[in-house]
Amino acid sequence: MAPKHSRQQTPAPQQPEPASGPPWVLLGGVAVVAALAFFLLFADTPPEAPAESADGSVAEPASDAPDAPPAADPAAPEPEPVEYEPVEVVVPPPGAPAPPTPFVPNMAPRPADLITEVYEFAGRRPDVLEFVPCFCGCESAGHRANAHCFVQSRNADGSVAAWEPHGLGCAVCIDVARDSMQLTASGATVDDVRNAIEDKYAPRFPRMTPTPPVPTN
């Protein structure tokens, strides 16, 4: 009989060892200690004191509010007053001769009879329109008042020597002279006319002639 072979026994598989590392309890303890240390560090920190300037005054902390406008500097120089050229107004005598009023073109901004009327008023009443400003920008042409939009030059007696054609095509010039003419006819003083014209036109137009104030005497 053949000898029986003995069966070789297979060794049992080894169980894997657990991974090395700190247990969860230890990790939780570390986290608690770190949180407690952070709390103790910042809980006892006093708020930052406001900075003190060299003169002993305490500076206010910075704020997110918008900065207030700077206060006016008391040492800043005041604006120089406007110097006006002296105006010598000579009112022409009644019936003084004058050149024919300018021809009004067909494309004029206002009716021809109104334009002729304001030209004649400007010729007769320099004592009014020499103190009424214009707002069309004609100061760039050397005009100082609404009168200069219609009268270019005068004779020694105040009568018109030459008309100014600028007023023919300017609605602003015509309207200012028309309003001045109507206010004067209603009995308004030159001061009243000037104030009414400025109240009406200054808010609408950014420019105004350097018109001298109405004389006080």
Image (tube, grey):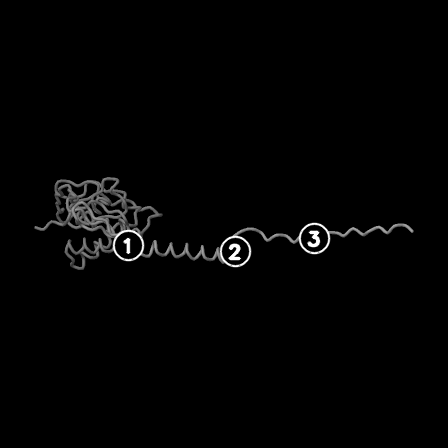
The kind of residue tagged 3 is Pro
Instruction: Give the Cα separation between the discs numbered 1 and 2.
Output: 40 Å
- Sequence-first tag of 1 and 2: 2
Which one is in front, 186 or 217? 217
Percent coordinates x, y for residue 37 in the rendering: 38, 54
- Sequence-first tag of 2 and 3: 3
Furthest residue toward left: 217
Secondary structure under the numbered disc 3 in the rendered image: loop
Report the label total: 3
User: Is residue 206 visible in the rendered structure shown here?
Assistant: yes
Instruction: Give the Cα separation between the discs numbered 2 and 3.
Output: 27 Å
User: Is residue 81 visible in the rendered structure shown here?
Assistant: no
From the viewer's perspective, is the residue at label 2 or at label 3 nearer? 3
Q: Which mark is residue 23?
A: 2
Q: Kindly indicate the quadrant of the structure image that contains residue 191.
A: bottom left
* Residue drawn at the location 59% of the way across and 53% of the way down: 18
Percent coordinates x, y for residue 189 in the rendering: 14, 56
The kind of residue tagged 1 is Pro
Instruction: Give the Cα separation between the discs numbered 1 and 3.
Output: 66 Å
From the viewer's perspective, is the residue at label 1 or at label 2 nearer? 2
Q: Which mark is residue 47?
A: 1
The kind of residue tagged 2 is Pro
Q: Which mark is residue 13?
A: 3
Percent coordinates x, y for residue 111 in the rendering: 31, 52
Dot 2: few (<14), some (14–19), or many (≥20) neighbours within 10 Å? few
Secondary structure under the numbered disc 2 in the rendered image: loop
Kindly check if marks 2 and 3 are in contact, taking CB atoms under 8 A apart as contact: no
Secondary structure under the numbered disc 1 in the rendered image: loop
